[in-house]
Image: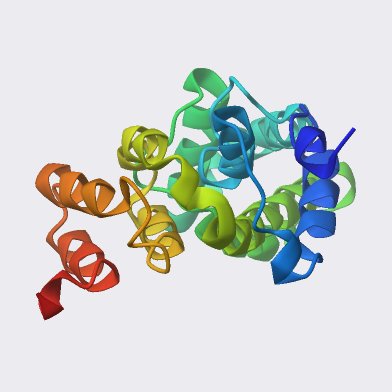
Amino acid sequence: MSVLDALNTTSYAAWAKAMAELRARPASELRIDITELDLLMLLRPFLWWRHDPGFADVYTICETAMPIILAHGEKLDEHGKTAGMFIATYLADGKHDGKGHEIDVYNWARRFAAKLRGAEKKALRALSTVMHDLYGSKHAAYNVLRHVGWQHPKTLGALIHGMAPGDQTFILHALDADLSKPGVKKFYQQFIAKTPYPHLVKEARRYAMMDEE
């Protein structure tokens, strides 16, 4: 089984290990042909909240933390409430609620865990850790996408708008070295036409070098 095949797993721990092995390869070894499925597996940190495909271990960590968040509902500040809704939406619907963020959950859960003891402390620490790791994996995946993402611009164009706005920048940046490849310029043009976010229009134009035309 290749490293790319190993990314097709329901275990985030296994996915992260395979990604670390892939990321450690020299750049010359990353210019490889990938299938659409390979691309989807590389994109998982940007879509981790989807249930299909999903990470069973991430789900379990969040599922364990959720009753603790609810039990301390009266003590939660706005950060805690936002984190709780973010996790609850993921667990219930396999969706991103558009308000939460992994790093926000990481910071809140780490602080709140310090107020708890025993199993509750352990559960919130695990939540904090996995959120931090998921965000870090976006950077690792981005660095691999820099070498292979250009092969499937249509698929990226279909998926990017379903990602959190902050994560879309990773994808926009991942293709800027391959503007001459088939479909890449069109990817940027279509993104600009569809996105509702003015700041992402500016980012896309910059990465596509449209401001220089």
- Please identify the residue farthest to the bottom as the structure is shown: 212
- Which residue occupies 75% across, 32% down? 64
Position of residue 96 measured from the top left corner of the image (x, y, whole percent): 43, 36
- Which residue occupies 78% across, 29% down? 9
- Which residue occupies 57% across, 38% down? 39
Res. 136 visible in picture: yes
Above or below: residue 144 compared with residue 7: below
Position of residue 83 measured from the top left corner of the image (x, y, whole percent): 50, 47
Position of residue 137 measured from the top left corner of the image (x, y, whole percent): 66, 56
In the rendered image, which quarter contains the N terminus? top right
Res. 76 visible in picture: no
Position of residue 129 measured from the top left corner of the image (x, y, whole percent): 74, 56
Number of labels in the image equals 0
Residue 18 relative to residue 138: left or right? right
In the rendered image, which quarter contains the C terminus? bottom left
Q: Quadrant of residue 153?
A: top left
- Which residue occupies 37% across, 58% down? 166
Residue 190 relative to residue 29: left or right? left
